[in-house]
Image (cartoon, rainbow, N blue to C red):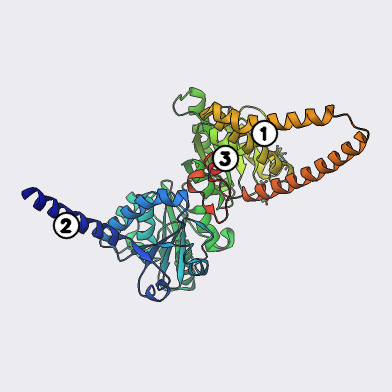
Amino acid sequence: MAEVKASLICGVIAAFLSSAVLAFVEDLDDTFKDTRVNDVWLVDFYAPWCGYCKKLEPVWHEVGMELKSSGSPVRVGKMDATAYSGMASEFGVRGYPTIKLLKGDLAYNYKGPRTKDDIVEFANRVSGPAVRALPSKQMFEHMMKRHDVLFVYVGGESPLREKYNDVASELIVYTYFFSGSEEVLPESLTLPELPAVVVFKDGGYFTYDEYEDGSLSSWVNKERFQGYLQIDGFTLYELGETGKLVAIAVIDEKDPTEESGRLKGLIQRVAKEYREHFNRDFQFGHMDGNDYINSLIMGEVTVPSVIILNTSNEQYFLPSEPIETMEQLVQFISSVLNGSAQAYGGDGIIQRIKRVAFDARSTIMSVFRSSPLLGCFLFGLPLGVISLMCYGICTAESDDGADDMDALKREGLTDEEEEEEEERQRAAELEGPEEGENEEEDVGEKDPEEKKTD
Ligand SMILES: *[C@@H]1O[C@H](CO)[C@@H](O)[C@H](O)[C@H]1NC(C)=O
Ligand SMILES: *[C@@H]1O[C@H](CO)[C@@H](O)[C@H](O)[C@H]1NC(C)=O
């Protein structure tokens, strides 16, 4: 009897807990359009069949739990975008999963890593005011400790302030925006005039100059990273959105040789000392290992070495000889800037076809590596059948053999053309970010296996 009672109590507690857990993430349907208006919502648009969506599910629960327990006003929901496709397309959902923060008329896309901390940080940043006030020196110092890059508007009401507000409400997806009076900023700060927009980073500060820097939004976009960064695949994709070229020291951090330390140091120095010359066009950093770069350029870069990438057209530049001095590095960067350096790669048709072949080869290699038997079966069987067919055709004796060959040729030709068209389409699909983890599964996407091996 006691056992029954105990299990009953357990059952009640479990039911209570599970309903509590469910409440952290609300299941949305097509009534959402009307009910959402008064709240800020963080929504996961998913498809039941999509693997990345399933991976996101536990993270999403944690996000819901964390936001609720921290007292955030943001409500967390999920919507089956295949069941409510009309709604999903109204919100501009084109792939799964799509994470959006909806705030009044504005919808912000989340494109960062799909971890709880990153998503919660995004929700807190974007749901708050676009421009946050810095009421005191202490607050400024506190924020300086928390953020590597800090944008601050200094001054009273002005047209610049209005522009700053507009830029902030758009680019809050990337970074925080603050405003304060001169009194809350360090005494060492000297501003030629007020109002001003200043970015604090890299141990100093830089002021926006309308005449030299162009529009405020493009300046913010270019200044939102530290001058020198550790770069991984995801950061590289993000850096690409600034439109800058990326100069990278490719090194092996597990086996730090003197040579890699020196190269890293050189790039760091150029980033700082030549900021005036290169900051507008270049982002600097280092990358651990050459795997990512190799698959990007479909070749092999030596470790350590320096490479400059143009992520907007997939071109890259290599120094003609190993870089030993600061002067050589500066010369190399200048030659890329003035267009005299030899460019490799690119996004032309030949490169795209090469990309398809390269990806196909990596897929085949990875299947063979993980399961040789499956590889033999998958790729060996069709090859065997084709060779048997060829053998049969070649050895077949017939009077009108010539006709057969003609027909074959014609068929072969059209096949090839079809293949090329397919390749072009695939190449076009491959345009997007290469980062597997953050890749969305597009509607009507092909074999998901293929994506994982990217
Ligand atoms: C990088 O690519 C863009 C887009 O094609 C191009 O306009 C720009 O000139 C390229 N930069 C360099 C240095 O080649
Ligand atoms: C480009 O820059 C390099 C390195 O500074 C220099 O040697 C070269 O003469 C320049 N070429 C042009 C066409 O300006």
Residue 411 drawn at (x, y percent): 82, 43
Is residue 359 rendered to the left or right of residue 21? right
- Whichever of labels 3 and 2 marks the residue nearer the N terminus, that label is 2
Residue 36 drawn at (x, y percent): 38, 72
Residue 170 drawn at (x, y percent): 48, 65
Alpha carbon separation for disc pair 3 and 2 = 59 Å
Q: Residue at x 80, y 46 (%)?
A: 414
Q: Residue at x 56, y 58 (%)?
A: 213
- Whichever of labels 1 and 2 marks the residue nearer the N terminus, that label is 2
Type of amino acid under label 2: Val
Q: Nearer the viewer, residue 114 or 72?
A: 114
Residue 364: name its quadrant: top right
Q: Quadrant of the C terminus?
A: top right
Residue beneath disc 3: 247
Q: Is residue 332 above or below residue 445?
A: above
Residue beneath disc 1: 382
Type of amino acid under label 1: Pro
**Crowding at mark 1 (Cα within 10 Å: few <14, some 14-19, many 20+):** few
Name the secondary structure under disc 1.
helix
Q: Nearer the viewer, residue 222 or 381?
A: 381
Is residue 98 rendered to the left or right of residue 351? left
Residue 30: name its quadrant: bottom left
Q: Residue at x 46, y 63 (%)?
A: 108
